[in-house]
Amino acid sequence: MELHLPSWSYDPPYTGYWNPVTSTINWCEEDYYTTPYAAEIVNTLTNLMFVFLAFKGIRNCVKHGHDSVFFIAFVGYLLVGTGSFLFHATLKYPMQLVDELSMIYTTCLMCYATFSYSKSRQYAFTLALGLISLAIFITLYYHYLQDPVFHQTAYAILTVTVVARSLYVMEFTLRPSLRNSEETFKIQHRKSMTADQKEISRLDDRRNAQILSTMWLIITVGLTTFLSGFGLWQLDNIFCSRLRSWRRGMGLPWGILLEGHGWWHLLTGIGAYYYLTWGIWLRHCLNGRQKEYLLVWPRILSLPEIVRSEQTNGIIEPGIAKKIS
């Protein structure tokens, strides 16, 4: 594939500063073609998206008082990005473990947050022991097996489990809860409701319906982004030799646009951020605090945030900008 745009050719690979490669897997990006200090430069730098979004999430949790489990989750998210940065820069096995196992641990944490909500202390303690045992088993067995397919399968199962459980909670716990709270209010005040109370009740009904529809929109955007990254990564694996040929034909910097694993980092990083933001909002709504917190999502392609509500009633529609001080 030839592209008639200003470009320069790929240089012969440098002698890598981190040689020899000790990781059990290597990706489709060629090694050390731009610098001797980063084995896979695109796969390394695209992890800065994780770092940026992790600090954004941590700051949001601290500033607006979200549950501590989400603060810890964003710290784990930061560890994933940092570990992946070091892994792709060095292609060393210890850095590979930091990258891949931090993904497992962070997802186990979200499993705990999702399945332990509103449960007894005994249930939560038993669940924590089970998940810690599972994480230890995956760690030891993966180190013994050293098969990336095992890690990818374990991560996929955990991720699907967390998302499916969160969807179940949203539809079968939150939706009935919002409906019942409004119906109870109407029954208790049906004979004595003033015109203002009727208007407030109508607005609450509208807000609750809008909360759920907007949650589904966040889920759709997040999952579509995440799965798009996964799809591009799989194309990178399947058509690696052809893509390498096309990259060399295009030259730099255009060839980096065909680095599928780099796109995996960018898109799954954004998709995971969407999930954590949805999780924060879902938790506040389950706690009956939907009037205290506001979803700020000015545009469909912007990054959503959950902030404390001051003079609004808990939601801003996509497309309506809200300035955050």
Image (spheres, rainbow, N blue to C red):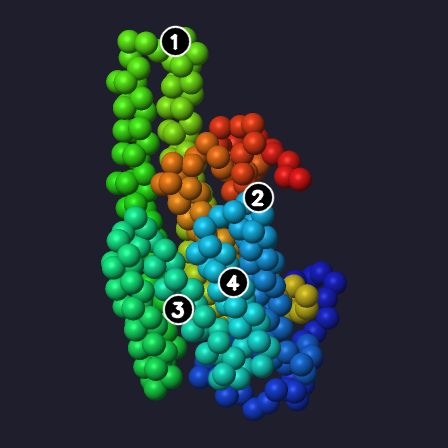
> How crowded is the residue under tag 3: few (<14 C-alpha within 10 Å), some, or many (20+)?
many
SS at mark 4? helix
Toward which corner of the image does residue 137 lie, by quadrant? Answer: bottom left
Kindly indicate whether the residue at mark 3 contacts the one at mark 4 (C-beta within 8 angstroms): no
Q: Residue at the spot x=40%, y=24% of the render?
A: 204
Q: Is residue 301 above or below residue 7?
A: above
| First-in-chain label (4 vs 2) | 4
Kindly indicate whether the residue at mark 2 contacts the one at mark 4 (C-beta within 8 angstroms): no
In the image, residue 189 lies at what x, y percent? 30, 15
| First-in-chain label (2 vs 3) | 3
Q: Amino acid at mark 3?
A: Ile
Query: Which tag is nearer the camera, tag 1 or tag 3?
Result: 1
Q: Which residue is mark 2?
A: 302
Q: Which residue is mark 1?
A: 194
Q: Which residue is mark 4?
A: 75
| First-in-chain label (1 vs 2) | 1
